Image: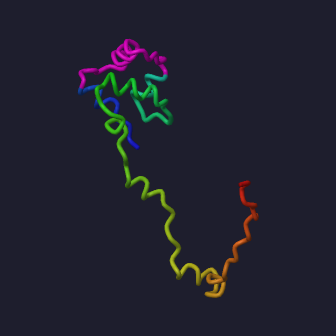
Amino acid sequence: MRWNLRLHAAQQGIWKSTELRRRLLEAGLEISAGKMSALWTGTPTTIRLDDLDVICTVLDCTPADLLISEPEKVAARKPAAKAPASRAASGETTADRTAAVTPRPGRRRSAPPA
């Protein structure tokens, strides 16, 4: 996810974090200078939904406008599938790969009372 706060603030004529902080305070959200700096300069690791709601109200936008999905980063995090050649190099045989897995029987539960 990419955090897009500064662009939407600029579209509303807010160029400084102190101005956004003042407007948030007027809307009922008091943010410390440190937290405001973190929201303004980078992507927050966490944000309360209540806070996000006030930010969206002040900037006249939706959460989807502030949080931009980056599917290419998700795809880059996927582990690469092992090629069959690498299995042969490790000494693994076809029988090792096709060994049947028997599921363990689950707990037998009694029927609920009638």
Please tell me which residue lies in front, 28 or 95: 28
Q: Which residues are magenta?
A: 12-34
Query: Left or right of 92: which side holds 7?
Result: left
Q: Is residue 23 magenta?
A: yes
The residue under the point 44% across, 22% down is 36
Please tell me which residue lies in front, 49 or 86: 49
- Give coordinates of residue 18: x percent, y percent: 37, 16
The residue under the point 50% across, 34% down is 46
- Give coordinates of residue 62: x percent, y percent: 32, 33
Please tell me which residue lies in front, 41 or 114: 114
Image: 78 above or below 102: above
The residue under the point 74% across, 70% down is 105
In the rendered image, the quadrant that contains the C terminus is bottom right
Query: Left or right of 80: which side holds 90?
Result: right
Query: Left or right of 17: which side holds 93?
Result: right
- Give coordinates of residue 27: x percent, y percent: 38, 15
Q: Quadrant of residue 25?
A: top left
